[in-house]
Amino acid sequence: MTARLIDGLALSREIRAGLGARAEALAARGRRPGLAVILVGENPASAVYVRNKVKACAEHGLHSVLEKYQSTLTEAELLARIKALNADAAIHGILVQMPLPPHIAPAKVIAAIATAKDVDGYSVLSAGELTSGLPGLRPCTPLGCMKLIESTGAALRGKHAVVIGRSNTVGKPMALLLLQSDATVTVCHSRTPDLGLHTRMADVVVAAVGRRHTLRADMVKPGAVVIDVGMNRNDEGKLCGDVDFDAVREALGATGWITPVPGGVGPMTITMLLANTVDAAEAAEAAEAANA
C-alpha cells in the first residue's frame, strides 16, 4: 500500500472559500482587502506568477492593483512608489515580484515595505516577529506547508521534523513554524553529511532544497509525512519536486502522507498570500478601532 496524497488543490479551494467570505464581510464594512503587486522587467515566469496572483484576488473578493514597470526603473523610483503604497489606506498588502533587475537591491526593497503590509513575510522585522513568537505575517510557502501538515491530522507536538534547506524564504521560517508547534526540528542542507541519517528518524520531512531526487525511498520511515516544496524539471522536461515521488510514496506505506508536484505546495502559496492580505486588512480595521 502506498502513502496517502495530501491534495493541495482541494485544501486551497476550501481555505479560499473562507477567505472570500471574510473579504466580503470586510467590504460590507467599507474595507475591501487590497493587494498591490509590482512587477519590474520582462521576466516571463514572473509575469505568469503575477497574473495568477491578480486573478486569485479577483476570484475571491480582494481588490488588486498591478503595477508594471520597465527594467529601466530606478531603485529610487521603486522605493518612492512603495512609500506611497505604505500610506495608501486602500492597500493592505504589498508584493514586489522577484527577481528584480540587477541595479535594484532586493534587501532595500523588502525593507521599504511596511511590516503591516509585508504579505510575503520576507522583511527583517517580519522575520524578527516570527523568531520571537510575536503575531505577524508569515512567509506564504512555509505557512502553506503548515496547513498541509495540519490537514493530515498529524499532531506535531513532540514529533521530530526535518527541514531540508536553509533559505530565508522557506527553510528557516519553516523550521521556526514547526518549533512553534512544539516539534523537535533538525535543519539539514547541501553540506549535511549523511542526510538519510536524519530523515530516517523524522516523523515529518519538508524538502525545500531545489534539487530533484534529494529525498529517496531509503531515507524515510513508514508512516512519515513528506512535504515536497521543490519545483524542478526532470529529463523529459516535466515538473517534479525534490522527492523521488513514486519510490518514496511506496516506502512510506499506507499510514504515510505525501504531497504531489504539481498539486501540493504550489496552490497553497498563493492561497496564503490571499490569507495574509485578508489578515492584514482585519488587523488594520482593529487598529483603527482601537485608536478611535
Image: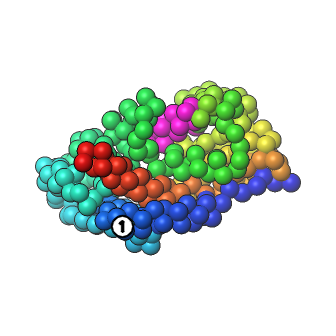
Determine the residue positioned at 43% across, 28% down.
132
Vertically, is 268 above or below 121?
A: below
Q: Position of residue 102 (x, y in %)?
A: 24, 49
Q: Position of residue 242 (x, y in %)?
A: 60, 48
At mark 1, the secondary structure is helix
Displayed quadrant of residue 186: top right
Determine the residue positioned at 54% across, 42% down.
209
Crowding at label 1, few (<14), some or many (≥20) Cα neighbours within 10 Å?
some
Give the residue at the far right of this rendering: 1
Magenta extent: 164-180
Q: Quadrant of the N terminus?
A: bottom right
Viewer can see residue 95: no
Of 21 and 213, which appears nearest the observer?
Answer: 21
Of 191 and 50, which appears nearest the observer?
Answer: 50
Q: Is residue 133 magenta?
A: no
Determine the residue positioned at 43% across, 59% down.
274
Viewer can see residue 140: yes
Vertically, is 59 above or below 74?
A: below
Give the residue at the far front of this rendering: 292
Q: Which residue is mark 1?
A: 27
What color scheme is it?
Answer: rainbow
Vertically, is 232 above or below 113?
A: below
Is 221 left or right of 134, judged from the image as shown? right
Q: Position of residue 15 (x, y in %)?
A: 55, 60
Q: Is residue 167 magenta?
A: yes
Vertically, is 243 above or below 158?
A: below
Is 188 left or right of 106, judged from the image as shown? right
Is 141 left or right of 44, judged from the image as shown? right
* Amino acid at dot 1: Ala
Determine the residue positioned at 44% across, 44% down.
138
Q: Position of residue 238 (x, y in %)?
A: 59, 64
Is 285 left or right of 167, judged from the image as shown? left
